[in-house]
Amino acid sequence: MTYKKGDKHAGNKPRTKKKSAVLTSYEKSFGNISVTCKTVGISRETFYRWLKEDPKFKAKIEEVDESNIDFAETTLLKNIREGKETSLIFYLKTKGKKRGYIETVDSNVTVNPFLELMKFATSNDID
């Protein structure tokens, strides 16, 4: 089948190959968009346009992202089993919140530092 110039399907073969190359590079770079675009020779704008306009492309990108999260979680759990403290703390702060493993910031301010500074400044005025 041949396509005429201006046909909405004209040029899809090269684009399909380019998208396939993007998906391969995206997976190899663990989802790094800048590296992917540079490796394949497309702009970030093109990447995001394909993501917006092509549901199949978007689904495959999301599949790679999910796979990367699975990999990271597996590595985190491996580190926890090995007793790596930072991994343990991170896990408890994110997954153990309902058990009280959460950092809080005390925002009870009983002194207004500006007023205290003004009192000090006015009490030390030189006449």
Image (cartoon, rainbow, N blue to C red):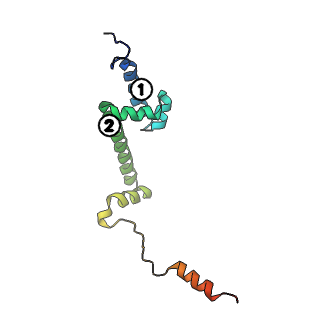
Asked if 123 appears above or below 45 in the picture, the reply is: below
Residue with the most extreme right position: 127
Q: Element at badge 1?
A: helix
Quote the CA–CA distance across marks 1 and 2: 16 Å
Q: How far across and down, in percent of the image, does residue 21 sit? A: 41, 26
Q: How far across and down, in percent of the image, does residue 45 sit? A: 44, 34
Q: Residue at x 46, y 35 (%)?
A: 44
Residue with the most extreme top position: 1
User: Which quadrant would residue 103 be assigned to in this image?
Assistant: bottom left
Amino acid type of the residue that numbered disc 1 sits on in the rendered structure: Ala
Look at mark 1 in the image and give the residue it sits on: 21
* Label ID, residue 102: none
Q: Element at badge 2?
A: helix
Q: Residue at x 29, y 64 (%)?
A: 98
Look at mark 2 in the image and give the residue it sits on: 63
Q: Residue at x 58, y 82 (%)?
A: 118
- 119 with respect to 75 (left or right): right
Instruction: Pick the residue in front: 50 or 35.
Output: 50
Asked if 101 appears above or below 20 in the picture, the reply is: below
Q: How far across and down, in percent of the image, does residue 7 sit? A: 34, 17
In the rendered view of the protein, which quadrant contains the N terminus? Answer: top left
